[in-house]
Image: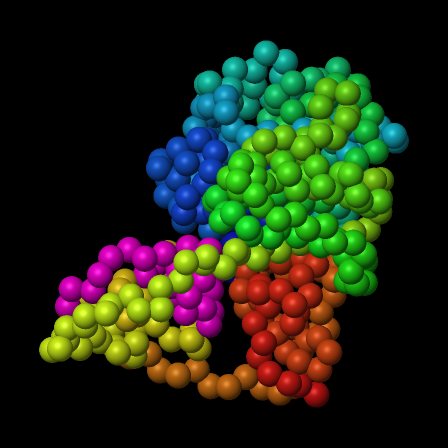
Amino acid sequence: MLMLPWLAQAHGTMDVPASRVMNCYKEGPESPKSAACRAAVEAGGAQALYDWNGINQLPNGNHKAFVPDGKLCSGGKELFKGMDLPRNDWVPTPISAGPDGKFEFVYNASAPHSTRYFEFYITRDGYDATKPLKWSDLESTPFCTINKVTLENGTYRMSCPLPKNKSGKHVIYNIWQRADSAEAFYSCIDVEMNGTVVSDWREIGQVRAQQDLAVGSKVTLRVFDKDGKDAESHTITLNNGMNTAAAWPYHLGQKVNAESRIVGIGKLDAKGVLKPVVSNTENRIYVHGQANYNTKIDIVAAPNPNPNPNPNPNPNPNPKPNPTPGAGCDGVQAWSNARAYNGGEKTAFKSQLWQAQWWTRGEEPGSMQWGAWKAIGKCTGGGGTTPTPTPAPSNKCEQPWSASATYTAANTKVSHQGHNYLNKWWTRGDTPGQADVWELQGACK
């Protein structure tokens, strides 16, 4: 029982290339786009994706005793059983060695802890992805072991020589064994190896299309330097045929690749050439070598071309009053703009029941086209409670925001240009005051 606090303090998974659970989380926990991720949610539920950083055990190095065959990707935990599904359509990340023969792995960690080792294994040639992954499916020795690594802005960056003569789809199995406790974390990483191809491109992010966009919408890729200052901006306006979830990342990639001096969008082919593809999940964002840049995609929805100024010209002269926004229903608490909601939580607002798709605070249900709230039905009765208001935040300045830092945990407080902010979800490179992920908490000094 004394070990349980350790489980709450340190969490993590591979971010580049994205682990299986991280990849599905970035597709959208409630409605992933790829068939494999949808099947994972059907098998184990969406909560596993919200808890992407919790595939862990307490093996103290004895991993095979705690993680049985067929359950490597879930770490032997029932919550994550969807990650163990034997399928050959898990979305892979193409990877190639750089000019130095190495690839930089980026691990998303939430707290600094002493590391005993990071180990990287890869599946044997001929591994059958349609069968559950077993320890014997991995090469007997890791192709890379890292014993000393420093946590920088919430991430561990590790350069590893890639295994030689590997090509095609493989699973990289990563183990992070801590030295200051028995805890270890496990990551299954679906990759597509490009053999001996050498590429100067280094992945820094992905283009994830959650849904089709309205014709006339504008999509902008913003590029920031290491200090968080705008370096480039590339915008497309979506015409007919460009606005589907699979199409607009492709057209954005074409625009960026034709104009940018810094970044590229697409999928690396067998020769290491970067080309955009028609897909809502497969396009990645790359920079050359060790260039230090971050990116953000902004979407401005097209205005409604046919607004109806009088939707009800013959109103009911004796309308039945609706519950006020402050009243709950069906035993569900009324929505409060002062409260933070985690993914999966429900609230009542304007006679409607809503469910949060991810962490949110201050966003009125139904106010945003691609917002956090999903309508799940009408209220049918009373019994809800009115929430207690949250006190105003302090005016003391929090730790300064850093453009290069990764803010993994929601509700992390930072200060920027004389104001305090609170992040709603995982973020990196998004400037407080300019990005929706940061919620203004007030002036500080």
Image quarter for residue 300?
bottom right
Q: Position of residue 163 (x, y in %)?
A: 75, 23
Q: Residue furthest right?
A: 100
- The one nearer the camera, 122 or 414, is 414
Where does the image place residue 105, in percent across and percent down from the top left? 72, 39
Residue in view at x 78 percent, y 54 percent: 232
Magenta stretch: helix, strand or loop mostly: loop
Instruction: State the residue in front, 374 or 116.
Output: 374
Extent of the magenta region: 354-381
Q: Residue 91: where, in percent of width, then height? A: 55, 30
Q: Nearer the viewer, residue 409 or 247?
A: 247
Residue 298, x across and y down, in percent: 62, 56
Taking the magenta stretch, the answer to whether it contains residue 357 is: yes
Residue 242, located in which quarter of the rendered image?
top right
In the rendered image, the quadrant that contains the C terminus is bottom right
Instruction: Give me the residue at 71% from left, 18% from top.
Output: 166
Question: Viewed as shown, does residue 88 lie left or right of 155?
Answer: left
Query: Which residue lies at the image location 52% right of the left edge and 15% below the top edge?
Result: 128
User: Quadrant location of the N terminus?
Assistant: bottom left
Left or right of residue 40: residue 317:
left
- The outermost residue toward the top is 126
Judge from the rendering whether residue 316 lies leftward or rightward of residue 204; answer left or right. left
Residue 361 showing in the rendered view: yes
The magenta stretch spans residue 418: no
